[in-house]
Image (cartoon, grey):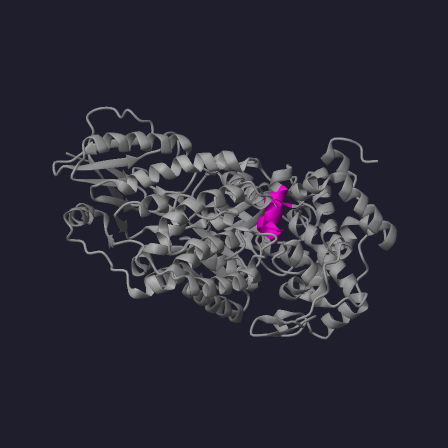
Amino acid sequence: MKSKVRDVLAGNELELGPASTASSPWLHWRLSRDGDGIAWLLFDRKEASTNSLSEEVMAELDAVLGVIEGDLPGGLVVRSAKLPGFIAGADINELRGAADPALVQAALGRAHAVVNRLEALKIPTVAVIHGFCLGGGLEIALACKWRIAISDARFGFPEVMLGLHPGLGGTARSTHLIDPLQAMALMLTGKVLDARKAKSLGLIDAVTEERHVRNAIKDAVSGKLKKRRLGLKNAILNTAPLRRFAAHRMRLETEKKAPHDHYPAPYALIDLWERHGSRRTAMIAAEIPSFAHLAVTGTAQNLIRVFFLREQLKKAAGKTRDFHHVHVIGAGAMGGDIAAWCAFQGLRVTLADVKPEPVADAMKRAVRLYEKICRKPIEIRDALDRLIPDLKGSGVHKADIVIEAVPEQCELKQKIYMDIEPHLKHGAILATNTSSIPLEELASALKAPERFVGLHFFNPVSRMQLVEVVRHTGVSAEVLAEARSFIGQIDRLPLQVKSAPGFLVNRALTPYMLEAMMLLDEKVPAEAIDGAAERFGMPVGPIELADRVGLDICLAVAEMLKVKLGHPMPAMPGWLQRKVEAGELGQKTGKGIYEWKEGKPVKAGATLAQDTEMTDRLILPMVNVCVACLRERIVEDQDSIDGAMVLGTGFAPFRGGPLHYARSRGIGNVVFAQRELARKFGERFAPDAGWSELSGAAIP
């Protein structure tokens, strides 16, 4: 009898081979044989929703391989018993806090021995892969002689996102299995491939559906499944002269996005391939100390920290109810894109506006978005079928959640609420996408403020993962939980914040961008200002960011915060106001502080040398606001602030977040630098009272 596990939600079945009549002697692995003499090894990590590779898991696999070697079957099938996928990679928990490269190297050496043992088996070995197959999971698959993918499988080496490179032999096995340039690109970018693309590269041998798995396995074991032959091109690309040339180009391209000083992992990977690319065994051996050295760097430890901060925000979403219908009011840049994203995530969406033109423009943007992110034409069609223009606003009656995304005018928003509140169905949530207006002001127009919440999305919606879930004094805990659940359902990360001017992200970004304007007013070149921020690790400098957001929006938010907060802020330069009045708003008008061509700012090539004072003028006000938001309990804990600032503003990920950066630099050092800046440039740099709370002691 075959044993099958049914995924009720997906309607999918996993072929898990023969049922075992005896309990497994291992916690995480199950071994059995079918009537054809083929052994099935199922990975089912105990008490985990997904499979990952820990030291314990690898030690057990070593023991399993010893049993298999003692009584060789006709073939071995390795697959996951977990419904989400094959193997998500290494257990990153085991790398948290790593400080001794010798310990990492020793542990990695033991794991390598297990993978090499799997590869050395004198029988056909077949990895059957469904769902995700990432990092160490892909490296386990590469150690098998055959790789068969179910059509939903996804493949990639995401280690570079953690400040690492593959560490279980993947650097050498991939560059010798497929075109080495394509393999290097896969590892350097962390890009994830679908099954068809992976097969076209030669990373896997066959793509099939679950119902045909047994036949595909038989073809592999019997030799009927033909392997793709390595061409002469692969051998030539792995020769020393071409490796040197290609490695040089790789470094130049990598430096544009990941400076060596901040992100050493890509360069360590390039070095590995350049030095050892023609010698597979030597490259596998050299991979171990290289990985161990990277694992203890500040970059890797901080990027691992950011990974867990993201997981923390993801868990905050929870699961309280399912949402089916979203009604969005306002088809502008934000409303239209929120609607398009919700429809892409499988919800029925009605999109309303007072005029048909914004709705038509939103539909056009949705088509362009779906053409980029959908894999198949039918997926584009289905998403567009779910996105419904609704000029009459009839979707209000049926929606589980109504999201208002009209311009930032309190009276306009309140009028909309009074008009639609009587028509909301029982249990529906009313949400606003306001970026700056305190919710208590907006809620004063409502009869049921307990069902009202803020959902502050960031632009572009399809790329920015963070959403601020804004609580006010009248909202119920149940609605807040449901709102977080909705954000999780549309594959976004909720950060719960207290209603206050600018919430967290906009409040923190505003002094960063305004200080850049002050530097411009002092005749510092825009390119030098952006360069200082980018060298610190920001993905985009403040001048370019202001142009991208829109100078009019930046000016309006700054004016609002200045009035609402009553804190010292730099005076807006007159030339900035004149630019806004002249319609020179940035990217959207083709001219702001920069000229814009083909969606990119035109910048002069030269920038000034690194200026520590200028960097502090830009970065420390942002960090200071984060401390103030913690003191005021806008956000309840330090980790949430760090995660939100990395994911919502791009704050240098390799620094682990603004508060972590302050602790790493030294709180006393940061406070002293702020006081020096305040002495030279004004009270806007004065350190917040919350620094004493952050340090746990009074700051002298």
Horizontal side, residue 140 vs residue 642: left or right: left
The answer to whether residue 400 is visible is no
- In the foreground, 408 or 355: 408
Please name the residue shown 25% across and 24% down the image: 23
Horizontal side, residue 155 vs residue 94: left or right: left
Horizontal side, residue 218 vs residue 380: left or right: left
Give the magenta-colored segment's residue range.
Answer: 641-657
Q: In the displayed structure, would residue 241 be above or below residue 666? A: below
Q: Quadrant of the C terminus?
A: top right
Residue 358 is situated, as x and y percent measured from the top left of the image, at: 53, 68
Residue 324 is situated, as x and y percent measured from the top left of the image, at: 42, 49
The answer to whether residue 94 is visible is yes
Residue 663 sits in which quadrant? top right
Horizontal side, residue 333 vs residue 504: left or right: left
Q: Quadrant of the N terminus?
A: top left
Does the stretch in magenta take in 650? yes
Please name the residue shown 69% across and 46% down the image: 500
Q: How many marks?
A: 0
Residue 389 sits in which quadrant? bottom left
Name the main secondary structure of what is drawn in magenta: helix
Residue 535 is situated, as x and y percent measured from the top left of the image, at: 66, 57
Please name the residue shown 19% across and 26% down the image: 21
Considering every residue shown, the one lying at the far left of the view is 35
Residue 495 is situated, as x and y percent measured from the top left of the image, at: 58, 44
Does the stretch in magenta take in 96? no
- In the foreground, 333 or 223: 223
Q: In the displayed structure, would residue 516 be above or below residue 477? A: below
Considering every residue shown, the one lying at the far right of the view is 679
- In the foreground, 75 or 52: 75
- In the foreground, 694 or 343: 694
